[in-house]
Amino acid sequence: MKNRHLLLILSLLSCSLLFGQPDSIIYKQTPEGDLKLYFDYPPNWTASDSRPAIVFFFGGGWKNGTVEHFSKQAAYLAKRGMLAVRADYRVKSRHGTSPDKCVEDGKSAIRWVRANAGMLGINPDMIVGSGGSAGGHVAACATLVVGLEAAGEDHSISSRPDLMILFNPVMETTSERITEMIGDEKMAETISPNNWIGKDTPPGIMFFGTADQFIESAIRSLPIAASQGVQLALWTAEGAGHGFFNKAPWMEWTLYLTDQFLQKNGYLEGEAEIIPPGEVTMEQYKQ
């Protein structure tokens, strides 16, 4: 019955993509409720395209959050030619779940997008994982952590993004405060991204305010990445705190640098359509 219901969902999706562009679709059914993906399409999109895609995961400390987070970034990148996807995932306030389920859902979302590349008009080998704070952690874990794959999915289809764009992500979950929040020391070690950076880690970029308490874990990720030959950059906003990228002028700056990073890796072409304010700047962190 479960497989039959899944086939029905896929059939409905195929039909909807043939006759239009659905705003959202259920990508996963869980005991705590259905989870959806929300789409922003590029101009002149067709299902036969082979465009890059980006999947955003909202922030909220694994407890709260809404898919409206990153709506502006999604709209901008769709205008630039990408399929932009905003993923809902289980959080404590709405679903009563713990952070490991957030990671599992992040992996499921990436897998679903890749599995349905032919209907979404995207290149299955050009999928970016992105998010802010806890959502950045989810994107990083989908990219790095081995395991925590949802049962019943086709694990021959990779749940790993091909690039990382992370907005003040939590790169370590092993501090006493976060471990207590997770409630399981072994799980805290498992879902700590810095523990998993290796030679096969795809390129990534991180954005932080220098006054953010989580920046130290991001700084610690840089020599780990360098020792493995991994391209991982950290850009900072002087004096800014956590969540700085949600407001001007840092939203414009982080979007501009995101555009540059995507161009560098062959995901976008042409000039960025956003100009960051000249009165402030972001600096790349140098080890």
Image (cartoon, rainbow, N blue to C red):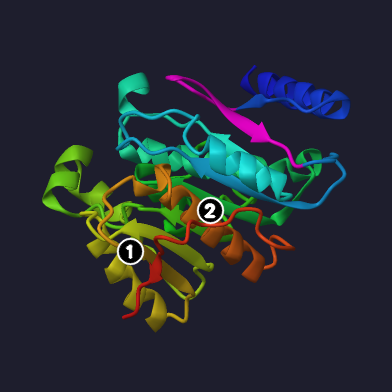
Left or right of 189, for residue 56:
right
Is residue 33 part of the magenta span, yes or no? yes
Front residue (pair 234, 49): 234
Instruction: Give the image location of residue 187, x and y in percent.
Output: 27, 47
Badge 2 element = helix
Badge 1 element = helix
Left or right of 263, for residue 66:
left
User: Residue 245: which disc?
Assistant: none
Left or right of 138, for residue 23:
right
Front residue (pair 168, 276): 276
Instruction: Give the image location of residue 180, x and y in percent.
Output: 14, 41
Q: How many marks?
A: 2
The residue stretch that appears in magenta:
27-42
Q: Residue at x 65, y 25 (%)?
A: 24
The amino acid type found where label 2 is placed reads: Leu
Q: Is residue 154 visible?
A: no
Q: Quadrant of residue 195?
A: bottom left
| Structural crowding at the residue carrying mark 1, measured as other residues with C-alpha within 10 Å and reported as few (<14), some (14–19) or many (≥20) | many
Q: Residue at x 61, y 48 (%)?
A: 54
Instruction: Give the image location of residue 95, x and y in percent.
Output: 36, 22
Which image quarter is the N terminus in?
A: top right
Is residue 77 part of the magenta span, yes or no? no
Q: Quadrant of residue 248?
A: top left
User: Residue 194: which disc?
Assistant: 1
Nearest to viewer (mark 2 / mark 1): 2
Q: Is residue 101 above or below residue 172?
A: above
Instruction: Give the image location of residue 141, x and y in percent.
Output: 42, 52
Q: Residue at x 33, y 78 (%)?
A: 223
User: Residue 255: which disc?
Assistant: 2
User: Secondary structure of the magenta portion, mostly?
Assistant: strand
Q: CA distance from mark 2 to mark 1?
A: 24 Å
The amino acid type found where label 1 is placed reads: Asn
